[in-house]
Image (spheres, rainbow, N blue to C red):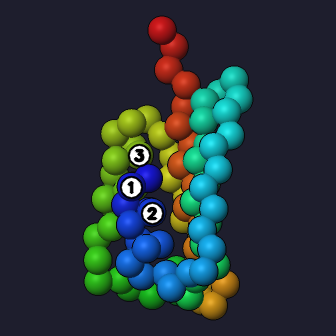
Amino acid sequence: MREAIHNVNKYSKASLCTISFIGDKEGITVRIKDNGIGFDMKAPRGGIGIQNMKERAVELGSQLHVFSKINIGTEVIFKIKQTKT
């Protein structure tokens, strides 16, 4: 999540960023959404930020989804599954 917020601050040129936490019986969903410049999801990227976020999510048993459109913005969704204790 920290990487996603860092990306909004450093790259997005957004005027608005919303972060929401939604909990239910299956776990917590964290959404980070901005109204920035976005990027082409199909174009190769030089950085490794998104790949690192995906790897961390897998390590935590979570899911990561990234959606972005040029001139619309970016949304990063973490689905963190509840662990049984």
Residue 31 got which mark? none
Can you tell which quarter of the image residue 45 is in?
A: bottom left
- Say whether residue 38 is visible: no
Identify the mark nearer the N-term, 3 or 1. 1
Amino acid under disc 1:
Arg
Instruction: Give the answer, above or below, for where 69 lies relative to 52.
Output: below
How far separated are the C-alphas under marks 2 and 3?
15 Å
Taking the spot 45% from the left edge, 87% from the top edge, the residue there is 43
* 39, 13: nearer the viewer: 13
Amino acid under disc 3:
Ala
- Say whether residue 35 is visible: yes
Taking the spot 61% from the left edge, 30% from the top edge, the residue there is 27
How far separated are the C-alphas under marks 1 and 2?
5 Å
On the image, the x and y values in percent for residue 10 come to 38, 78
Can you tell which quarter of the image residue 82 is in?
A: top right
Residue 2 got which mark? 1
Can you tell which quarter of the image residue 60 is in?
A: top left
Residues at badges 1 and 2 in contact (C-beta under 8 Å)? yes
Identify the mark nearer the N-term, 2 or 3. 2
Q: Element type at marker 3? A: helix
Amino acid under disc 2:
Ile
Residue 57 got which mark? 3
Q: Element type at marker 2? A: helix
- Residue for badge 2: 5
Taking the spot 39% from the left edge, 43% from the top edge, the residue there is 58
